[in-house]
Image: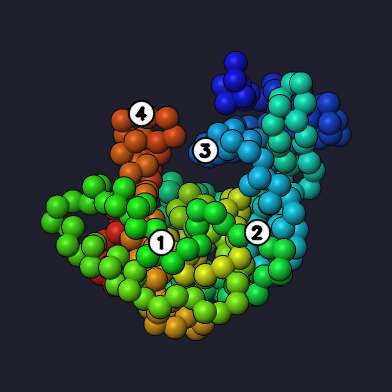
């Protein structure tokens, strides 16, 4: 079996804990639905084990190990924080990390009913996150560019757009491509805010997860969440509370929201067809997000 074909089971997780962190091996282990690059297992009530699965390198987990302990203390929402490291071994030749568990239901399996509260919460979280990053902060190789450098990805996703929306979606994207570049300092950016990477409780946002794509750069990549995550009618309030985005940044963010929406729709189609890596719950979330983008 290749590394990618190794079946990750509760018994394997327990064996690895017994080998490297035996004091945790007696805690209950339960699989968590979702995940692609990494698979999550709940460990007791307060922890989770993040197992490298489809990610070809350990880079994303190692990035979380390095930087989440730096960022977490100043963020106003719970985020997963590494507490123990699991190293490759004969039993499992990949990295794994024990992290704090962030309670809540992923948004692709739930909904936000308190839109104003969620807008305020997300704005406050991103204001706290979007501070100037240090010189050695990671730079993304596939995220963080100006939309004009992402046209290949947009064109690849574009066929999922219904014919009656094609002109409107293209107009949003063209406007983002024409927007000015980010000229501020490189800021900390989550990089992958979409419904599966935030959790909800009590009808509002209660946590942010999966920081494997974090980087230093243009905050527009996170501000796209105003449309991708928040319910209809919340974007204006979000930007008022965030209060740090100029018109050009909002234009880039709206175009990137369209790009992310199409990606979610494409992943949803793959899930509906039973293809590897497909996510059936992402399709409806992506279409709803695209509708919000087009409403402005």
Q: Which one is earlier in the sequence, the residue at label 2 or at label 4? A: 2
Quadrant of the rendered structure where residue 239 is?
bottom left
Q: Which one is earlier in the sequence, the residue at label 2 or at label 3? A: 3
Q: CA distance from mark 2 to mark 3?
A: 22 Å
Describe the element under mark 2 as helix, strand or loop: loop
At horizontal 45% and vertical 53% (from top left) the residue drawn is 195
Kindly identify which residue carries mark 1.
Answer: 149
Kindly identify which residue carries mark 2.
Answer: 138
Marks 1 & 4, CB-CB < 8 Å contact = no
Kindly identify which residue carries mark 3.
Answer: 36
Q: CA distance from mark 3 to mark 1?
A: 26 Å
Q: Which one is earlier in the sequence, the residue at label 1 or at label 2? A: 2
Tell me if 36 is positioned left or right of 275 in this view: right
Nearest-to-viewer mark from 1 and 4 = 1
Nearest-to-viewer mark from 1 and 2 = 1
Q: CA distance from mark 1 to mark 2?
A: 19 Å
At horizontal 45% and vertical 75% (from top left) the residue drawn is 181
Nearest-to-viewer mark from 3 and 1 = 1
Q: CA distance from mark 1 to mark 4?
A: 31 Å
Marks 1 & 2, CB-CB < 8 Å contact = no
Q: Position of residue 226 (x, y in %)?
A: 42, 68
Kindly identify which residue carries mark 4.
Answer: 274
């Amino acid at each position: 079996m290749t590394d990618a074909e190794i079946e990750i089971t509760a018994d394997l997780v327990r064996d690895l804990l017994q080998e490297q962190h035996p004091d945790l091996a007696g805690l209950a282990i339960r699989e968590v639905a979702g995940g692609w690059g990494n698979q999550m297992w709940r460990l007791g009530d307060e922890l989770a084990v993040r197992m490298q699965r489809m990610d070809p390198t350990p880079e994303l987990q190692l990035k979380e190990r390095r930087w989440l302990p730096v960022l977490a203390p100043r963020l106003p929402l719970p985020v997963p924080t590494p507490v123990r490291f699991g190293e490759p071994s004969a039993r499992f030749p990949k990295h794994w990390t024990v992290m704090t568990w962030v309670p809540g239901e992923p948004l692709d399996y739930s909904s936000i009913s308190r839109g104003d509260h969620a807008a305020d919460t997300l704005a406050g979280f991103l204001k706290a996150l979007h501070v100037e990053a240090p010189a050695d902060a990671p730079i993304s190789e596939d995220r963080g560019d100006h939309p004009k450098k992402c046209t290949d990805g947009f064109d690849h996703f574009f066929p999922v757009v219904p014919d009656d929306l094609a002109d409107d979606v293209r107009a949003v994207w063209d406007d983002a491509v024409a927007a000015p570049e980010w000229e501020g300092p490189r800021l900390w950016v989550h990089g992958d805010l979409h419904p599966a990477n935030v959790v909800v409780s009590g009808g509002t946002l209660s946590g942010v997860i999966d920081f494997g794509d974090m980087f230093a750069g243009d905050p527009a990549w996170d501000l796209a969440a105003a449309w991708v995550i928040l319910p209809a009618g919340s974007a204006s309030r979000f930007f008022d509370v965030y209060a740090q985005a100029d018109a050009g940044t909002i234009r880039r963010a709206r175009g990137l929201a369209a790009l992310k929406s199409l990606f979610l729709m494409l992943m949803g189609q793959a899930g509906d067809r039973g293809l590897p890596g497909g996510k059936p719950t992402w399709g409806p979330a992506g279409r709803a997000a695209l509708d919000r983008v087009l409403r402005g």
